[in-house]
Amino acid sequence: MAERFDALVVGAGAAGLMCALTAGRRGRRVLVIEHANKVGKKILMSGGGRCNFTNTGTTPANYLSANPHFCKSALARYTPWDFIAMVERHRIAYHEKVLGQLFCDVSSKLIVKMLVDECLAAGVRIETDCSIERIAHEDGGDFRAHTARGAFAAPALAVASGGLSIPSMGASGFGYEIARRFGHDVLPTRAGLVPLTLSGKHQERLADLSGLSLPVTASCNGRDFSNQMLITHRGVSGPSILQISSYWQPGDDLRLDLLPGRDALDWLQRQQRERAAAELKTALGETLPKRFAQRLCEHWLPNKPLKQYNLPELKQLAATLSAWPLVASGTEGYRTAEVTLGGVDTDGVSSSTMQSKRVPGLYFIGEVLDVTGWLGGYNFQWAWASGNAAGLAI
Ligand SMILES: Cc1cc2nc3c(=O)[nH]c(=O)nc-3n(C[C@H](O)[C@H](O)[C@H](O)COP(=O)(O)OP(=O)(O)OC[C@H]3O[C@@H](n4cnc5c(N)ncnc54)[C@H](O)[C@@H]3O)c2cc1C
């Protein structure tokens, strides 16, 4: 005999816990099934241990999806201010770092504790270390989860099992398998918010500069992000690169403006007027990290005293400095990616309730769906908003 609930939630991450506490507050009997040994592992490791739990500037424009309209309804009905209100009710101190990104002052553990406390107060049961052997479903009837802890049944099943990033933290393709089994399309997945790798001469030229960081504007496929870039042993990382990585695929043209916010030709002409005898690498070394400026002048820019450049040459230098081509060979993959792009096709899911349009009672929430946010708290905001939408509908 299966133990009966009103809803089974697969995955005790951000979206699953939010869905469970929302449905639980409405009097629903909810069981959360988590295969890892503890809940909210990604929340715990997020934001360097301080969880960037939302972004006050969240809009639908901060998300990638084959259907950019899909996220609108849920985001409008559960805003960053709704989550902030819960954080304040639990007296969790937080601060804005930059650009609307809110972080805990002390620890991500407080966010997990808040979600678990809210779940318990709403009568939600959470089973950790509980792997699912199979899910059965009778037409129009209950979903039945056969687990290591026995069988559980409910008329609603919310799939909140996340994406493929960081397998060591419990990530699995479970949600995609369930979606396919119930007739949903799953759009191709790939790592997002992930460091890029370089190979061959591109890597050799930069590898020993590993650890250097500089502000750049990274552009690809009509998108650009201005922020720090970090050179790593195998390639490049840092916020500007993580952001643009979600828009990049192998073979795409990726450019970096190395003098962001400045007109490169103006800057070069001013240097030429003010310090004609200085070499390009010296002038550049005062505005870029010195070793990086030298490396640029060894491989990408002809170096000589500034007074020796004519106007066409200066224009050429300016063109390279403002749109330096970065030939990435790939990404570091799911091992280090913060998110998974693609996933359950939103065409088959209601944008107001997250319920499957094919199978009544089946819900998909959080990262398992083809909705992926930028870096900066947007992914958690999507988890809260989609979890809330399903929790209100179940
Ligand atoms: C290192 C890192 C840092 C990040 N920092 C931030 C940040 O600061 N701000 C931000 O907005 N986003 C951040 N993210 C992204 C954010 O963590 C995710 O977008 C978010 O956690 C997605 O929520 P989710 O509930 O959909 O999935 P998850 O939080 O991944 O939860 C899914 C849960 O399902 C469980 N599960 C999987 N398969 C099964 C199964 N078969 N049976 C039972 N349980 C299963 C998993 O163990 C997990 O607990 C970060 C991600 C990483 C990897």
Image (cartoon, grey):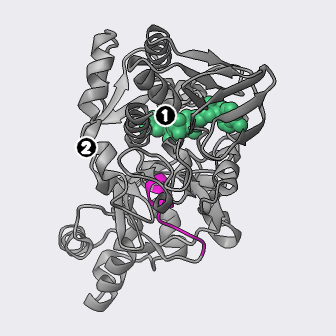
Foreground: 376 or 2?
2
Pinpoint residue 380: horizontal percent, then vertical percent. Answer: 43, 36
Q: Residue at x 39, y 30 (%)?
A: 53
CB-based contact (under 8 Å), mark 2 and mark 1: no
State the image coordinates of residue 123 (x, y, percent, origin top left). Answer: 49, 11
Q: Quadrant of residue 200?
A: bottom right
Residue drawn at x 43%, y 25% as measured from the top left: 23
Mark identifier at residue 267: none
Percent x, y of residue 376: 38, 41
* Left or right: 50 as drawn, with respect to 82: right
Report helix, strand or loop for mark 2.
Answer: helix
Q: Residues within 10 Å of mark 2 (few under 14, many from 20)?
A: few
Res. 182 visible in picture: yes
Question: Can the viewer see residue 98 in this picture?
Answer: no
| Residue 102 on the magenta segment | no
Quarter of the image that includes the C terminus? top left
86 w.r.t. 309: above or below: above
Q: Nearer the viewer, residue 49 or 256?
A: 49
- Asked whether 12 or 361 is in front, the reply is 361
Residue 15 is marked as 1
274 in relation to 137, above or below: below
Mark 1 and ligand 1: say if the CB distance to the nearest ligand atom is below 8 Å: yes
* Amino acid type of the residue tagged 1 in the rendering: Ala
Image coordinates for residue 389, horizontal then vertical, percent: 38, 38
As measured in the structure, the alpha-carbon distance from the residue carrying label 2 to the one carrying label 1 is: 16 Å
Q: Is residue 246 magenta?
A: yes
| Mark with earlier residue (2, 1) | 1
Ligand 1 within 8 Å, label 2 CB: no
Range of the magenta residues?
241-250
Q: Which residue is mark 2?
A: 76
